[in-house]
Image (spheres, grey):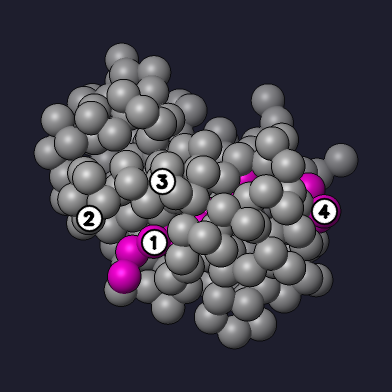
Amino acid sequence: MTVRVKVCGTTSVRDAVLSAEAGADALGFIFAPVSKRLVTPQVAREAGLSVGPVVARIGVFLGQGLDEVLRTAEAARVSAVQLHGPLRGLYVRQVAAYYPVLRVVRPADLAVEADMWRDEPGVTLMLDAPEPGGGVPLDWAALRDVFPRGAWLAGGLGPANVAAAMQALNPAGVDAVSRLEASPGVKDPALVEEFVRAARPS
């Protein structure tokens, strides 16, 4: 199975195009107001249009109301929604009625959330570090027995360690932000290319 590769924290058309040309399957656009990589729906929409329909466009949200999430996702023309933070199951299901959902969980919540979403085809788990975007990898060996089949992996991934993470946990997708940047919100083309190549060994 080919692992899907997501480059998150995209803030410009330039970075969207370079990630797509490097072979990324998905781009992440962060709409959480607390993020250093905050992007407007208009820029996200323009960036998404610049790469064509083959590349998934994922809107990233943290603790925002249902109406705001759906309005922003529509304005940005995303193809899926990534939800962070403590959320009720009903909220996640309401979003999933409109968009495929990547439900981001921390290691401490993994068992409960994996059980909750096991039979929900519209919701895919993504395991992330307790502090998303901090560049700190998880203890993959400690998670080997509990990492759910079909889940995605984030948290401190980059060109140097993504292959080891994949070998340990066999995720369906991998997601990186801070280790692919020249500065917050600005991608380093060489690092993006190296990350995609490392996640897809020939």
Image quarter of the N terminus: top right
Residue at disc 3, secondary structure: helix
- Looking at the picture, does residue 127 appear above or below residue 130? above
Comes first in the chain, label 3 or label 2 = 2
Q: Earlier in the sequence, mark 2 or mark 1?
A: 1
Mark 4 or mark 3, which has the lower sequence index? 4
Q: CA distance from mark 2 to mark 4?
A: 32 Å
* Distance between the alpha carbons at the discs numbered 1 and 3: 9 Å
Q: Is residue 83 above or below residue 90?
A: below
Say which residue appears at 47% left-offset and 38% top-offset: 80
Position of residue 190 in the picture relative to residue 113 (left or right):
right
Please name the residue that numbered disc 2 is placed on: 64
Q: Position of residue 178 (x, y in %)?
A: 54, 72
Q: Which mark is residue 73?
A: 3
Q: Nearer the viewer, residue 101 or 128?
A: 101
- Res 198 visible: no
Query: What is the number of the mark on residue 31?
Result: 1
Which residue corresponds to the image point at 30% horizontal and 73% vertical from the top-left? Answer: 34
Write down the region rendered in magenta: 21-33
Image height of 137 relative to 64, above or below: below
Are the residues tagged 2 and 1 within 8 Å (C-beta)? yes
Q: Is residue 90 visible?
A: yes
Q: Which residue is mark 4?
A: 21
Are there few (<14), some (14-19), or many (20+) residues within 10 Å of tag 3? many
Callout 3 amino acid: Ala
